[in-house]
Image (cartoon, helix red, strand yellow):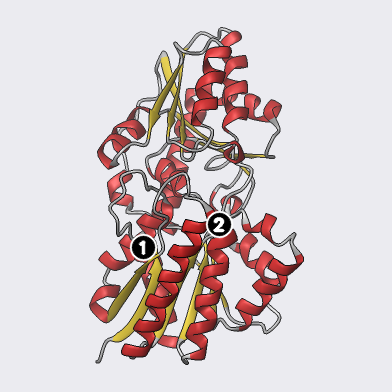
């Protein structure tokens, strides 16, 4: 059977920037490394930003124009069957939306895969809301990261295009930890991701300060792995709260260091105000780390509250403190949650599950 030419617009880190991380990079890379590459011919357009934090608006517009010209050249010179388009929010969505419409004009069937929770804020703008509707009108298939996102996009899906659900995925075998120690006198709480106010990092710092001040009979550490626009402010807060002996700012960690970090972490906290479907949560759950997260985006699709993790309302620091303390004080509870979360990821969030779904979409579109 002749391979289909699939234009894949996503994050591939073409510039090999060491400061670029994230779930979209892994997701795109894992698709190219899956058995889908044996069945299809992928033609890539890398949409990664050139730096973190993002460059100024003029540079971003210039990069977008270059990518749009690259898209036109590919569509003119190649017979493209399908365009698989990963997109974020804001300006990124506007660019990918224009690409979607252009592909449609060339009679290329499009699969749009939004992967950012911040689009909830974007649709408060009437022009953006109308643009979103227009983009969906020119899309053949929409893939969402969970039921909650499917319900969100239904409100803008005026032509009732097919909507598929595919939660994020990971290489489960890389992350599973067979033997995890639960009876310890020193426990590590992990924050893994962008160090940004929207990610709830300041809520976590405030709660951690309160827990340390209670002087429970445990030695506690807060491990912060990541960087972002509020990294220096977090440094200041750590000193202000007298937490320097308890908090370790690790910056971005590579894959090997991340795996070591997951092995020694006992509780993972995702206090974010906005999320699509964080890969860091999947990595921690696959490693058997009991996780506490806000009930935003598609997180409630993967965390079954009280069974394989815990959910709370974003910004509710009292509830967050209570959940952390309950896990710190109960090793049996941590063990129970650990087993359940590993099993859930193994059954629902592997590369094999995702590639099977995409393969079916490619065949039926």
Residue 322 higher or lower than 102, as above or below: above
Q: Which residue is pictured at 62% across the width and 21% down the height?
A: 206
Pointer 2 local density, CA inside 10 Å: few below 14, some 14–19, many at least 20 = many
Q: On the rendered structure, is 286 left or right of 18?
A: right
Residue under label 2: 116
* Residue tagged 1: 28
Quick check: marks 2 and 1 in contact, CB under 8 Å? Answer: no
Name the residue located 46 percent from the left edge and 70 percent from the top edge. Answer: 65
Q: Is residue 145 visible?
A: no
Give the quadrant of residue 77: bottom left
Mark 2 and mark 1 lie on one chain; the one further toward the N terminus is 1
Seen from the viewer's position, the closer of residues 168 and 247 is 247
Where residue 32 sits in the image (x, y, percent)? 29, 67
Q: Position of residue 30 (x, y in %)?
A: 31, 61
Q: Quadrant of the N terminus?
A: bottom left
Label 1 residue SS:
helix
Rendering coords of residue 308 (x, y %): 52, 43
């Amino acid at each position: 059977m002749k391979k289909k030419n699939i234009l894949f617009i996503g994050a591939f880190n073409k510039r090999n920037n060491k400061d670029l991380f994230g779930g979209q990079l892994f997701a795109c890379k894992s698709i190219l490394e899956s058995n889908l590459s044996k069945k299809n011919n992928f033609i890539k357009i890398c949409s990664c930003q050139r730096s973190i934090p993002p460059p100024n608006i003029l540079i971003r517009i210039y990069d977008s124009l270059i990518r749009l010209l690259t898209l036109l050249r590919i569509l003119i010179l190649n017979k493209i069957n399908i365009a698989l388009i990963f997109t974020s929010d804001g300006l990124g969505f506007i660019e990918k939306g224009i690409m979607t419409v252009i592909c449609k004009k060339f009679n290329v069937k499009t699969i749009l895969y939004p992967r950012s929770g911040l689009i909830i804020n974007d649709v408060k703008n009437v022009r953006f809301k109308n643009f979103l509707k227009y983009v969906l009108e020119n899309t053949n298939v929409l893939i969402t990261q969970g039921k909650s996102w499917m319900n969100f996009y239904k409100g803008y899906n005026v032509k009732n295009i097919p909507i598929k659900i595919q939660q994020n995925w990971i290489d489960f075998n890389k992350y599973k930890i067979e033997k995890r120690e639960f009876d310890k006198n020193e426990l590590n709480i992990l924050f893994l991701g962008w160090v940004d106010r929207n990610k709830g990092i300041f809520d976590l710092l405030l709660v951690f300060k309160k827990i340390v001040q209670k002087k429970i009979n445990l030695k506690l550490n807060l491990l912060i792995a990541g960087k972002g626009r509020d990294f220096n402010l977090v440094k200041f807060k750590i000193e202000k709260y007298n937490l320097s002996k308890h908090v370790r700012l690790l910056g971005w960690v590579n894959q090997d260091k991340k795996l070591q970090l997951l092995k020694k972490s006992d509780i993972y906290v995702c206090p974010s105000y906005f999320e699509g479907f964080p890969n860091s949560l999947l990595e921690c759950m696959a490693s058997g780390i009991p996780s506490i997260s806000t009930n935003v985006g598609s997180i409630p699709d993967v965390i079954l509250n009280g069974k394989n993790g815990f959910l709370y309302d974003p910004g509710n620091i009292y509830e967050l403190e209570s959940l952390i303390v309950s896990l710190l004080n109960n090793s049996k509870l941590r063990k129970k949650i650990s087993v359940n979360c590993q099993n859930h990821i193994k059954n629902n969030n592997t590369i094999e599950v995702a590639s099977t779904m995409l393969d079916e979409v490619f065949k039926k579109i």
